[in-house]
């Protein structure tokens, strides 16, 4: 797909790695996705690294801040959802039972954002774009293509997110071995949701980003050889594709997928 010039409200628009070792993370992800990394000063003690393919932004990374480390926040990928007003979205999230971890604030001239925790505990950001719309390339290998909520209560989570973003919540028939819900924005499937099963262990509610790849097995093998851990080895989703869930060497979780069909 070509370069994108905007993201409709309610769309996943940006993905950001918060890591304990930016230098090592750059090496790991460049090996997997061939991302270019451009470091940008973002304060006296912070560097914000733009991740690019062919010069087009596909995400970012930064080091965990001292306050995050003090609170035991582990390395993680953060999801951003585009909104018309970060202030309104934060207020609505609170009214629906969410927790506003950081109220709406300006990020220089590039946008306005808020950090929110849903009622079950999953964290995400809302993004009101100004100079920065979010990712500029989608639909190609190495780009973000799907986001999946792992939650402890799918029914309550569906009430929260449909109320907040106006999403549809469609029960999937894609052949998943467990109940699966597709998030839809403007009638288009953009992500999914499933409940955390007891056999998965003490997994906290979270958003899991998926990146598109040409060969799931080859990319998973490369991740494992580079210090990553295959939490879910490559396996097929009937009529959809082949995927794997990976933990990077610093501990952040993400997934890869090679699409072979279409989610209906």
Image: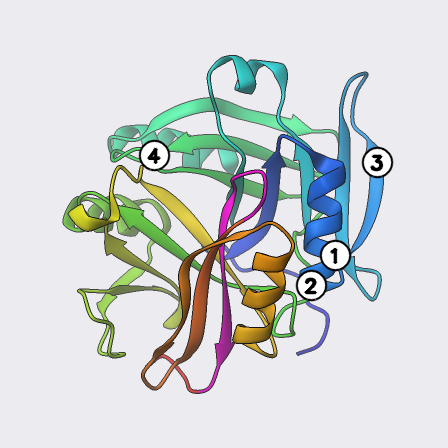
Residue at 72% across / 36% down in the picture?
22
Whether the residues at callouts 1 and 2 have beta carbons within 8 Å, the answer is yes
Residue 11, position as x, y percentages in the image: 49, 57
**Which quadrant: the N terminus?**
bottom right
Q: Which mark is residue 93?
A: 4
| Res. 88 visible in picture | yes
Between the C-alphas of marks 4 and 1, the distance is 35 Å
Check disc 3: other Cα within 10 Å, few if <14, some if 14-19, many if 20+.
few
Given residues 176 and 58, the one toward you in this image is: 176
Residue at 71% across / 76% down in the picture?
2
Residue 139, position as x, y percentages in the image: 61, 74
Residue 75 location, quadrant: top right
Check disc 1: other Cα within 10 Å, few if <14, some if 14-19, many if 20+.
some
Tag nearer the camera, 4 or 1: 1
Element at label 3: strand
Tag nearer the camera, 4 or 3: 3
**Magenta region: which residues?**
248-260
Upstream in the sequence, badge 1 or badge 3? Answer: 1
Residue that label 1 marks:
30
Residue that label 2 marks:
33
Residue 122, position as x, y percentages in the image: 35, 38
Upstream in the sequence, badge 2 or badge 3? Answer: 2
| Res. 84 visible in picture | no
Residue at 28% across / 52% down in the picture?
162
Residue that label 3 marks:
40
């Amino acid at each position: 797909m070509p370069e994108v010039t905007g993201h409709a409200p309610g769309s996943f628009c940006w993905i950001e790695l918060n890591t304990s070792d930016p230098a090592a993370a750059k090496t790991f992800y460049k090996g997997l996705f061939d991302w270019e990394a451009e470091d940008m000063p973002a304060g006296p003690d912070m560097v914000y690294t733009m991740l690019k393919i062919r010069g087009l932004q596909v995400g970012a990374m930064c080091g965990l801040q001292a306050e995050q480390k003090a609170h035991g926040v582990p390395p993680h990928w953060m999801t951003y959802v585009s909104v018309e007003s970060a202030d309104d979205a934060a207020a609505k999230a609170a009214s629906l039972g969410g927790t506003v971890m950081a109220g709406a604030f300006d990020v220089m001239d590039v946008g306005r954002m808020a950090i929110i925790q849903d009622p079950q505990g999953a964290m995400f950001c809302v993004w009101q774009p100004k100079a920065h719309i979010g990712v500029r390339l989608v639909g190609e290998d190495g780009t973000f293509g799907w986001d999946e909520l792992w939650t402890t209560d799918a029914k309550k989570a569906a009430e929260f997110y449909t109320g907040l973003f106006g999403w549809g919540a469609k029960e999937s028939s894609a052949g998943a071995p467990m109940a699966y819900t597709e998030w839809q924005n403007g009638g288009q499937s953009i992500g999914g949701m499933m409940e955390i099963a007891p056999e998965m262990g003490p997994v906290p509610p979270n958003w899991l980003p998926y990146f598109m790849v040409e060969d799931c097995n080859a990319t998973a093998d490369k991740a494992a050889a580079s210090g990553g851990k295959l939490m879910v080895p490559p396996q097929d989703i009937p009529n959809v594709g082949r995927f794997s869930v990976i933990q990077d060497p610093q501990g952040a979780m993400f997934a890869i997928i090679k699409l072979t069909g279409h989610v209906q």
